[in-house]
């Protein structure tokens, strides 16, 4: 592809991504950059929890968080608590330090500033991946635009910052700056279940063990400064179990626990099995990270464990799964013989399978993702072969979407009643417990129907394919770059 063609594609993808934020309708319902859009953002929960903590309150309790969300988040948009209900903030205490500065601004200004930071992080991560892999910027931006981009923008999620931290850490490791790479990796602890894996890999395999210990100690000190040991203990002992239970029935959960729930496994056992599976996969990722780094370069040391951390477990949202992309894209560049398989996994993870009523702009990004996977997976082939592969992949993608959207709305497991929360014995004063009740109410849009489960299968397949490619690369012979 000529330089002019690459530039045109890069501009097209960037324009589509930004325009998708501004159009009044996406995914079949009105989501605009307006008060109602900002009222629906999870940033409202982060903002209110940080504000409650700044004023000396407990950010995990229902009463103060609900009061703030009603006053600061819902009321200015004309929305009510009945429209959205409670939005908990199950973050570790040190995360509130990130959001406390925003609380000195009115919520609407703070939310727009946060949105701009997420957009900037996504563009920066795409450029970092371009430098890390040598792949075109337009392809990297397309891959990050759905899972790590637009969906996160819609919900104000932190994943774009975590993805950028992983990419920066990978670049620093390639430059043999392990201590600074540890600092960058520490930002992935914003989501502890994601950041734990790459931090463990650095502790086991790098020469910067002291930096890892210092980073964890700094997080502990920050937690103590923000909330003291009592708030930290509350988070671990009460909030995490309650929120994991609350999320079991949510339709955009990609955890093993959620899948086992649909299969009829009792919730307590499903949570235990999800935790066990998470531990096994993370340990496998940490163990394999060292050999991968020796064979394919130091960036694999943090990117592969991060990819492992978003496979199954007890709690993985769709927005967090893009953490698997930096490793997939890096391995695709470092191992030409694995490119086809790894690009297939990356494309399955990056495509917006749940967005069955996506706008044309989002579909344009999906087409760019398929095009990137096709072109780069067959980059040593003639253009005629690339065109045939691209056509086949596009046809398969759209036929799959059409088939998934037309599955019968069969209920695979009857919805639980709110009484199940009381029976489980979780603390009713916690916001996460109230969220569990609302998620199980008759008005909740979530439910274990066949289409809602089937639409997650391609993403699960992509994650497992990336994981399998990573493990296969450990034992396989390191290929010479073309």
Image (cartoon, helix red, strand yellow):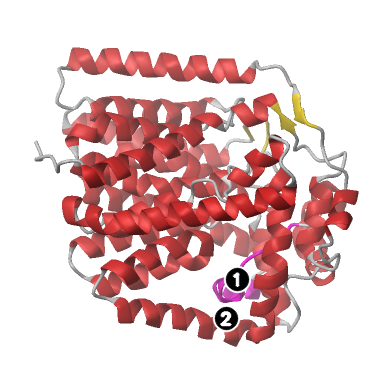
Q: Dot 2: within a 10 Å radius of its alpha carbon, few (fewer than 14), some, or many (20 or more) residues?
A: many
Tell me where residue 42 appears, x and y as whole percent: 66, 55
Name the residue: 76% across, 80% down: 57
* Residue span colored magenta: 87-104
Tell me where residue 357 appears, x and y as whole percent: 62, 25
- CB-based contact (under 8 Å), mark 1 and mark 2: yes
Residue 223: assigned label: 2
Q: Which residue matches tag 1?
A: 92
Vertical arrangement, residue 293 with respect to residue 216, above or below: above
Outermost right residue:
419
Vertical arrangement, residue 480 with respect to residue 79, above or below: above
Is residue 80 among the parts visible in the rendering?
no
For the C terminus, the quadrant is top left
Q: Is residue 99 magenta?
A: yes
Give the quadrant of residue 141: top left
Our reading of the magenta stretch's main secondary structure is helix
Give the quadrant of residue 111: bottom right
Q: Secondary structure at mark 1?
A: loop
Is residue 400 among the parts visible in the rendering?
yes
Across the whole image, how many numbered discs are drawn on residues? 2
Give the quadrant of residue 86: bottom right
């Amino acid at each position: 592809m000529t330089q002019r063609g690459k530039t045109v594609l890069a501009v097209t993808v960037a324009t589509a991504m930004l325009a998708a934020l501004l159009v009044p309708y996406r995914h079949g319902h009105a989501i605009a950059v307006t008060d109602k859009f900002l009222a629906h953002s999870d940033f409202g929960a982060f903002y209110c929890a940080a504000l409650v903590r700044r004023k000396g309150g407990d950010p995990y309790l229902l009463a103060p968080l609900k009061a703030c969300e009603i006053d600061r988040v819902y009321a200015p948009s004309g929305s009510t608590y009945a429209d959205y209900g409670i939005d908990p903030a199950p973050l570790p205490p040190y995360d509130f330090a990130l959001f406390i500065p925003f609380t000195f601004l009115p919520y609407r200004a703070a939310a727009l500033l946060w949105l701009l930071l997420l957009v900037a992080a996504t563009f920066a991560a795409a450029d970092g991946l371009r430098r890390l892999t040598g792949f075109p910027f337009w392809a990297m931006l397309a891959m990050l635009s759905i899972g790590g981009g637009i969906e996160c923008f819609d919900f104000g999620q932190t994943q774009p910052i975590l993805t950028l931290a992983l990419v920066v850490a990978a670049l620093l490791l390639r430059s043999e700056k392990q201590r600074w790479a540890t600092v960058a990796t520490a930002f992935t602890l914003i989501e502890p279940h994601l950041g734990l894996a790459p931090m463990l890999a650095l502790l086991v395999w790098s020469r910067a063990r002291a930096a890892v210990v210092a980073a964890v100690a700094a997080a502990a000190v920050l937690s103590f400064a923000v909330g003291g040991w009592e708030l930290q203990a509350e988070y671990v002992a009460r909030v995490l179990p309650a929120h994991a239970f609350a999320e079991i029935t949510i339709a955009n959960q990609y955890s093993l626990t959620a899948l086992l729930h649909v299969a009829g496994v009792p919730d307590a056992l499903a949570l235990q099995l999800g935790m066990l599976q998470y531990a096994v996969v993370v340990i496998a990722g940490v163990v394999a990270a060292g050999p991968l780094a020796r064979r394919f370069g130091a960036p694999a040391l943090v990117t592969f464990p991060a990819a492992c951390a978003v496979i199954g477990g007890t709690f993985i949202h769709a927005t967090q799964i893009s953490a698997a992309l930096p490793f997939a894209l890096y391995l695709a560049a470092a191992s030409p013989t694995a490119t086809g398989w790894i690009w297939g996994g990356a494309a399955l993870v990056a495509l917006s399978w749940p967005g069955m009523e996506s706008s044309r702009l989002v579909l344009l990004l999906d087409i760019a993702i398929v095009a990137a996977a096709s072109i780069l997976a067959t980059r040593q082939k003639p253009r005629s072969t690339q065109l045939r592969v691209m056509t086949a992949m596009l046809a398969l993608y759209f036929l799959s979407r059409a088939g998934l959207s037309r599955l019968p709305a069969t209920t695979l497991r009857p919805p639980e009643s709110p009484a199940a929360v009381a029976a489980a014995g979780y603390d009713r004063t916690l916001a996460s417990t109230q969220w569990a009740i609302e998620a199980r109410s008759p008005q909740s849009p979530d439910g274990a129907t066949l289409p809602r489960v089937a639409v997650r299968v391609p993403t699960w397949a992509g994650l497992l394919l990336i994981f399998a490619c990573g493990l296969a690369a450990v034992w396989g012979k390191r290929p010479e770059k073309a």
